[in-house]
Image (tube, helix red, strand yellow):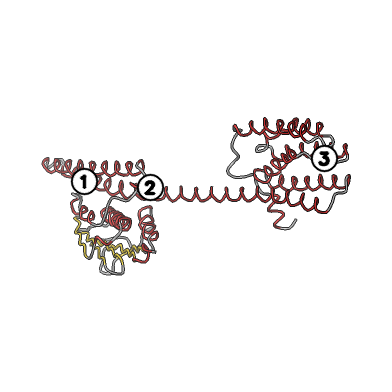
Amino acid sequence: MTSPVRALWDAPAAVPAPPGRVWRDWVLVGVIPALAVVEASVRTDVPWRWLWAVVLTALAPTLLWRRSRPFTMLAIAFAVGTAVGLATAGDPQLYTTAYFLILLYAVFRWGSGRAMVAGGALVVIGMLLTFLATPPQVADVIGGVAVAVTTSTLGLAVRWRRRARSRELEQVRLLEREQLARDLHDTVAHHVSAIAIQAQAGSAVAATDPGATVQVLHAIEAEATRTLREMRAMVGVLRGPDDALAPTPGLAEIRSLEMDAATPAVAVRLGGDLDSVPRAVAAAVFRIAQEAVTNARRHARGATRIDVGVDVDSDGVRLEVRDDGVGAASAAPGYGITGMRERAALLGGTCEVGPAPGGGWVVAATLPRAGWTA
């Protein structure tokens, strides 16, 4: 087989899976026999009309399994319909026989690649047998082929559109999970790191300075309170209405990093028109700064100071977080570094992490205005 035919032959059934039996299926099963009987009663000029009405009534239940067993139901219906047509030496002239198109649509909408190929071949064979038994006019042949092709194409179009929509939704879910993972990591890791540092300091001075231990406990309590507050804020955003999904921290909140009791101390400098920065961009800058400070406190040996600088100008926002400690020559990108780079990339910017030329460790992020105004 050629590659396209092989791909079609090996194609799986429709994704997502077809829905279960619904009330519309039972309506169709009840309506089609009724329409067949009414049409047979009205159109007295149609030969074998009552036989076709009985055949359609008997075949109507195949609609109940058209999604789960599309090819089998089509094969049953076309086999019976073709046999009756050959036995009566005539085409079914009842309009109700358009019911067969529903089964043909179901094969291309829900069936596997093998079912589609076999179903198409079955329809072609059935049409050829009918045409051989009763030579039709050219217009009838063209009309029959056009209807079958249109029905099959419609089934494929709906199938591919639904699959594309499912992929879009899955991509949105993945992006939301990544964003939630970044927010959880940045929020929880920052405060828990501060709590861990304070706990270690408390353990070191507990035996010699009980007063310092009390101060450490107060600091731990404050960090835990801030952690709970930010977690509740995140849960509130997730549970709130769509218009409440705006990020809450901004550039001004970066100054709150100075108030952490953990060491080393943080010095924040903000410059430029802070109000001109959109909330989404400001939130990203805050989270990058928060994560950079957390990493410095956890990994910068001998650091006594962490400087956080934010500059806003006509080109965008530049963030630099630098410590004066002794860091490793290189660092494997963990969740924190990956999250910082992802936040910057989502806004068309960059985030570089590495050792500073004059010693220490530096995180430099640049978010150009073109990235958030495009």
Q: CA distance from mark 1 to mark 2?
A: 27 Å
Q: Nearer the viewer, residue 131 or 11?
A: 131
Q: Amino acid at mark 3?
A: Thr
| Residue 263 left/right relative to 287 | left
**Residue 73 horizontal/vertical position (percent):** 72, 37
- Residue holding disc 2: 180
Up the image or down, 315 lies above or below 90; here it is: below
The residue that label 3 is drawn on is: 82
Q: Which residue is mark 1?
A: 198
Amino acid type assigned to the residue bearing label 2 in the image:
Leu
Q: Nearer the viewer, mark 1 or mark 3?
A: 3
Q: Position of residue 315 (x, y in %)?
A: 31, 69
Distance CA(mark 3)–CA(mark 2): 58 Å
Q: Amino acid at mark 1?
A: Gln
Between residues 153 and 134, which one lies in front from this camera angle?
A: 134
Mark pair 1, 3: CA separation: 84 Å
Q: Nearer the viewer, residue 280 or 187?
A: 280
Residue 104: image x %, image y %? 71, 43
Mark 1 or 2: the one toward you: 2
